[in-house]
Structure formats: C-alpha cells, structure tokens
Amino acid sequence: MHIDMVSLQGYTLYDDIVSEKNKGENIMPKGSPELTNARREEIINACEKLYKTMGFKEITIKEIGCVTSFTRTSIYNYFQTKEEIFLALLKREYELWISDLQKMMDRYDTMTADEFADRLARSLEKREQLLKILSMNHYDMESNSRQEHLVEFKVVYGRTLSTVKACLDKYFPQMSAKEKQDFIYTFFPFMFGIYPYTKVNEKQRAAMENAHVNYVMMTIYEITYNCVRRLLRY
C-alpha cells in the first residue's frame, strides 16, 4: 500500500512513518546522498523488473511506482520521465560490462583474435538486458531525458568506448589507430541490432515463415563472435 507524501516544514509524513517503523534500526538520514542513491537504485531496479515481462510502451511511471516502497509522486524527485529511468538502467548495464572487460584484461596478458572474439562474445552474452535496451529507440530515450542525466550517461558510454579501445591496444598492438577506430565505430552500432536478430518471438517467427524469409536463427554469442572475427581480420 502506498502512503501519500505530505510536506511538513521540510519533512514528509512518509519519512516520519518510515522513521517510526524503523526506530532502533540503523537507517539512512533523510536527504543524505546514501538515501538518494538507494532510492534511485530502487526505482531503476523496479523498472528492470517490469521490463522482463512488459514492453517499453507499457511501462509507465505509475507502473514503476507500484513496485517501489514509496509513492509514484516521489519518483519525480529523482526522474522526470521513464526515459530517464531507462537511461539510468542502460548506464548501469554499461558499467557492468566495463567491469567484465576490465577483469578480462586483468586475467589475460595476451589473446589471439579467436580468443578475443570468444571472450568478448561471452561478455555480451551475459548482458542481455544491455542489448535489449539498445534495441529500443535510443534517439527518443536520450531526447526525453534532462541534460544532467544525459551527461552522466555519456560519461559512462565514453568509458565503455575507451575500455574496448584499451582491449584492442593490449591484445592487438599491430593494429593502426585507424583500424581500431573502424572496429569501434562498426562494432558499437552493430550492438544495437544484436537483440532483435537473436530474440524472435512466435509472432515474428510465424510472420517470417508466412513471408518465406530464409532466416537463420543465431545466438548472442554466435552473431557477436562472427562479427568480431571479421572486424579483426586476423
């Protein structure tokens, strides 16, 4: 059950009730960065949970509010649109992928092209949520987010580009700067199509059969591995 927030001299009825409920427990102070971050994460987690069973168009701020511990109105203190929430979820997915790639570089000193293609493909196989969000209308998602949220996202996106380049620097020092740039500016746009080319629902499958489309079903691993091997050309 949601409790409507009532402003009272800088405090809220909701926070007072939560404080009373958690009296004697170690709770985060109101207005603290820890509480702000915790609530942002709760909203992002709620969005992620809904996205597993619902489409982007079906998900609303109201729906997200129904699976958080505070009111729908409170969400607007952190995110003004659902696109901002999805952008934050995408940012988190990129951060997780960066972590995976950094662990790969820490573990392996050298790799052949085949080994790199294999491990890069496996790293994306774990990030299905990242690929699913990328398959949406990315332009609208960014356009409907405030500048500060977009800048936060772009910082992490830039780190992702730099991390992939660092992988190329480490494992393929023979590649020229132009070849590395070509790899990145081909592979990242390619990622937008991985999910729709590997995750086909029954309606889509039936439509392709009726249209007599000779479609070869591939996994995230297979399509990514094949792309990386061709881009490296070694």
Image (cartoon, rainbow, N blue to C red):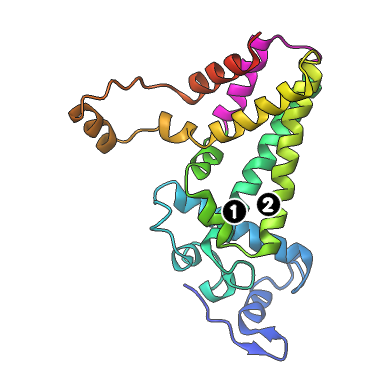
User: Dot 1 lies on which element?
Assistant: helix
Residue closest to the far left? 210
Q: Is residue 68 above or below residue 226?
A: below
Location of residue 165 in the rendering, given as x and y in whole percent from the top left corner:
75, 28
Residue type, numbered disc 2:
Phe
What residue is drawn where x is 49% and y is 41%?
Answer: 132
Q: Residue furthest bottom?
A: 9
Q: Position of residue 130 (x, y in %)?
A: 56, 40
Residue visible at 25% across and 38% down in the picture:
203
Asked which quadrant contains residue 211, the reply is: top left
- The residue at the point 59 percent across, 87 percent down is 6
- Given the current orientation, which residue lies at the most extreme front position? 178
Label 1: how many Cα within 10 Å (few below 14, some 14–19, many 20+)? many
- In this rendered view, identify the residue nearer to me: 45 or 171: 171
Do the residues bearing badges 1 and 2 touch, measured as CB atoms within 8 Å?
yes
The answer to which image quadrant residue 98 occupies is: top right
Look at 73% across and 11% down and name the residue there: 111
Magenta span contains residue 117: yes
Q: Give the CA separation, mark 1 to mark 2.
A: 7 Å
Relative depth, front residue between 190 and 107: 190
Q: Is residue 197 left or right of residue 128?
A: left
Numbered range of the magenta stretch: 108-126
Q: Quadrant of the C terminus?
A: top right
Q: Quadrant of residue 157?
A: top right
- Three-letter code for the amino acid on which mark 1 is drawn: Leu
Mark 1 and mark 2 lie on one chain; the one further toward the N terminus is: 1
Please give the label number shown on residue 87: 1
